[in-house]
Amino acid sequence: MRPDTALAPTGEPRKEIYVYELPVCCLRSLKETVVSRAGSGAGHDRRLLTLDCGCGRSWRITSSLDERVLGVFVTHAGARAGAGGGPPAA
C-alpha cells in the first residue's frame, strides 16, 4: 500500500492524515478491505464512500495514487485539494 494515500475522518476534512499515521486497527481495516474487494468483482460493483473500522472511526479517502485503493474507494477532496482555503495541491 502506498504511503502517499491520504485520509480524513468522516466530516472533518481539515484533519487529513497519511495512511502511515492511521491507528493500527484502522490500517488493518483498510488493508483487509482493499485485499478482500480488489479484484473480486462479485457483489462489489460500487466503490465504497468510507472506510469504517471496528473501533468506531470512519474515514474518507482524500487522495491516493494506489490503483488498488482507487478501485475500492471513492476519493473525496480533502484539505490539500483547496477545502482548507490554501492553494490546490499540484
Image (cartoon, rainbow, N blue to C red):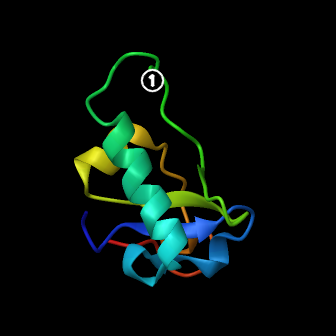
* Residue kind at label 1, given as amino acid type: His
Q: Quadrant of residue 84?
A: bottom right
User: Which residue occupies 48% across, 77% down?
Assistant: 24
Lateral position of residue 70 relative to residue 17, left or right: left
Q: How many marks?
A: 1
Spot occupied by residue 67 in the image (x, y as percentages of width and height): 24, 47
- Which of the pair 40/68 is nearer the observer? 40
Q: Residues within 10 Å of mark 1 (few under 14, many from 20)?
A: few
User: Which residue occupies 40% across, 73% down?
Assistant: 19
In this view, 27 is above or below 53:
below
In this view, 29 is above or below 43:
below
Spot occupied by residue 68 in the image (x, y as percentages of width and height): 27, 46
User: Which residue occupies 36% across, 39% down?
Assistant: 36
- Which of the pair 56/64 is nearer the observer? 56
Lateral position of residue 64 relative to residue 2, left or right: right
Residue 82 in view = no
In this view, 48 is above or below 54:
above
Secondary element type, mark 1? loop
Residue 49 in view = yes
Spot occupied by residue 82 in the image (x, y as percentages of width and height): 55, 70
State the residue position of label 1. 44
Find the residue positioned furthest to the top.
Answer: 42
Q: Quadrant of residue 16?
A: bottom right
Q: Quadrant of the N terminus?
A: bottom left
User: Which residue occupies 45% across, 83% down?
Assistant: 21
